[in-house]
């Protein structure tokens, strides 16, 4: 569905996406890298459980949330790819511990 | 002159108070125009915490305690009707609320105040003072430095933004007219009625209702209808959406239906400055974490400041005049709690032509006058 317009300059690194190893370019936008890897929906909503994927890609809409390195509700469009990141799909509301 | 510039009722102010009166009047079949400002308005309705709050109100005024209790008791029916009419969900819930105390002394004083109000109010309410152990039994997530709480089943919460939207939608549905970017700059007599000046030209009406928030200090000066109100800033933070853990209201933390946790408890006298400051936000967050330690793991996504409309004693000011036609003024800081009253009984009284009967005596601004010896 999405085609990369130009090759990112960084080196290829490995990420873990829902337990599966994927490759992405270091330093590229994480939401874009996940879309490129065919990831979706990114999460389901806390209230109705409906599926969501990135919309604004600029930090405003909060639709692209995912769990990054164990921390829920992270805006993937505001993150850049680092080697060894662990991304998990988020289902419903986030746990903040003690619950 | 176009008929559009002449109407039966003009409401000055499109917040929750003006919206409630305009909705009630339109619903009663009256011709209503609501004059609102734009997004630059100092708008308490958009910074509101969203509590329907009874407990502790009216310590200095049994009439205010009764008014608040009646309004809160009417909230469910009001919400059901407004939701049915507009399709806007108000997220009203009334599981009761805790006022969280951090020392035993605070809890003792709080319970005394609640008992004093209970003894003086004529509309029945109820409360309990509970110690830490009982509080932890009801809400296991409370922190170790919480000493206890007062709990009242009379308190509730609602979504203030949805309420504002529903009131305007309801008014419009019943034929009322909403005009944004029409800030009223003054009101003068005009024959048997009034003329309201705006930057977009004058509007004429037979009856005017002033619900201009902080603007009520001045907008009705030329018709002798003002209120001594001043801005009191509150700063609020909201977290990311997290798994629901707090269905109850509390005095300064509320979890919304969607899961975000709202914190706010500050009061500052800083004029019309709506900004936020780090020390106050830090203290507010610190206190929230003290109450519920796991909130330390929740990230804040927004913070904002808003200005309460405060009268000298915190009790509403309601007044009317007949100079030359019926005119009314409403100044309150609890527009959400009192919305059922403003859209209901207050509208009936406005339609009767004045607020002169004894029921409004306690809300007259004459209470602030220095008494002659």
Image (spheres, coloured by chain):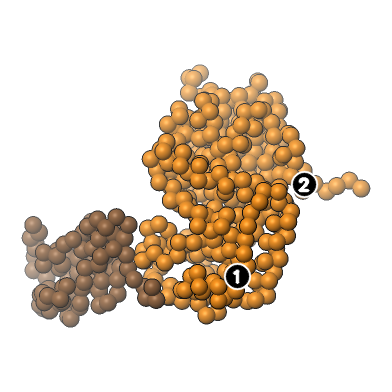
Q: Between residue B73 and residue B88, name the one nearer to us.
A: B73
Q: How many neighbours does mark 2 have within 10 angstroms: few (below 14), some (14-19), or many (20 or more)?
A: few
Q: Disc number at residue B130?
A: 1
What is chain A's hue in the picture? brown
Query: Nearer the observer, disc 2 or disc 1?
Result: 1
Q: List x then y, in percent, for residue A78.
A: 26, 67
Query: Which residue does the image show at 50% across and 64% down from the upper left?
Result: B253
Q: Is residue A99 left or right of residue B306?
A: left
Q: Colour of chain B?
A: orange
Instruction: Where is residue B60? Give x, y as percent.
Output: 73, 55
Is residue B229 in view?
A: no
Residue B113: where, in percent of width, then height? 70, 63
Residue drawn at the location 17% of the way across and 73% of the way down? A18
Find the distance from the CA under tag 2 to the CA under tag 1: 36 Å
Q: Would you identify the image quadrant in which residue B127 lies?
A: bottom right
Q: Residue under mark 2: which chain is it in? A: B
The chain that hosts pointer 1 is B
Crowding at mark 1 (Cα within 10 Å: few <14, some 14-19, many 20+): some
Q: Is residue B137 left or right of residue A16?
A: right
Which sits in the foreground, B63 or B316?
A: B63
Residue shown at 46%/50% (left/top)? Answer: B92
Q: Is tag 2's residue or tag 1's residue first in the polypeptide sequence? A: 1
Residue that carries the numbered disc 2 in the rendered image: B367
For the image, the number of numbered tags is: 2
Q: Which labelled disc corresponds to residue A97?
A: none
Give the structural element (helix, strand or loop) at label 1: strand
Residue A64 falls in which quadrant of the image? bottom left
Extreme residue in the right direction: B373
């Amino acid at each position: 569905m999405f085609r990369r317009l130009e090759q990112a300059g960084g080196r290829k690194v490995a990420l873990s996406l829902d337990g599966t190893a994927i490759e992405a370019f270091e330093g590229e936008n994480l939401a874009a890298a996940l879309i490129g890897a065919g990831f979706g929906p990114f999460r389901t909503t806390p209230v109705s459980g409906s599926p969501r994927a990135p919309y604004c890609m600029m930090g405003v809409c909060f639709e692209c949330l995912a769990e990054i390195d164990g921390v829920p509700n992270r805006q993937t469009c505001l993150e850049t790819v680092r080697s060894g990141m662990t991304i998990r799909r988020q289902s419903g509301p986030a746990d903040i511990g003690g619950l | 002159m176009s008929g559009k510039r002449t109407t039966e009722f003009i409401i000055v102010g499109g917040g929750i108070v003006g919206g409630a009166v305009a909705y009630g009047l339109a619903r009663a079949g009256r011709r209503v125009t609501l004059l609102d400002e734009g997004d630059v308005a100092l708008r308490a309705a958009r910074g509101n915490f969203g509590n329907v709050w009874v407990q502790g109100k009216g310590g200095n005024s049994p009439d205010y305690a009764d008014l608040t209790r009646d309004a809160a008791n009417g909230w469910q029916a009001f919400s059901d009707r407004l939701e049915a009419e507009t399709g806007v969900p108000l997220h009203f819930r009334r599981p009761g609320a805790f006022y969280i105390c951090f020392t035993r002394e605070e809890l003792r004083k709080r319970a005394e105040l609640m008992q004093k109000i209970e003894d003086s109010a004529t509309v029945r309410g109820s409360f309990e003072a509970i110690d830490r152990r009982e509080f932890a039994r009801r809400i296991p997530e409370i922190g170790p430095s919480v000493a206890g709480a007062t709990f009242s089943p009379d308190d509730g919460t609602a979504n203030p933004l949805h309420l504002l939207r529903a009131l305007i939608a309801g008014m419009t549905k019943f034929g009322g007219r909403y005009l944004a970017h029409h800030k009223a700059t003054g009101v003068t007599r005009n024959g048997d009625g009034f003329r309201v000046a705006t930057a977009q030209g004058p509007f004429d009406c037979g009856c005017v209702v002033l619900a201009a928030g902080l603007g009520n200090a001045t907008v009705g000066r030329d018709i002798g209808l003002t209120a001594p109100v001043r801005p009191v800033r509150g700063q609020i933070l909201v977290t990311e959406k997290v798994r629901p853990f707090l269905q109850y209201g509390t005095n300064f933390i509320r979890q919304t239906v969607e899961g975000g946790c709202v914190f706010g408890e500050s009061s500052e006298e800083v004029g019309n400055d709506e900004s936020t400051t780090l020390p106050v936000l830090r203290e507010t967050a610190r206190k929230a974490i003290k109450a519920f330690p796991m909130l330390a793991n929740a990230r804040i996504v927004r913070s904002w400041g808003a200005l309460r409309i405060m009268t000298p004693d915190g009790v509403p000011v309601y007044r009317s005049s007949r100079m030359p036609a019926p005119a009314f003024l409403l100044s309150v800081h609890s527009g959400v709690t009192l919305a059922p009253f403003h859209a209901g009984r207050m509208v009936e009284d406005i339609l009767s032509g004045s607020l002169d009967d004894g029921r409004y005596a306690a809300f007259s601004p004459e209470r602030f006058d220095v008494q002659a010896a």
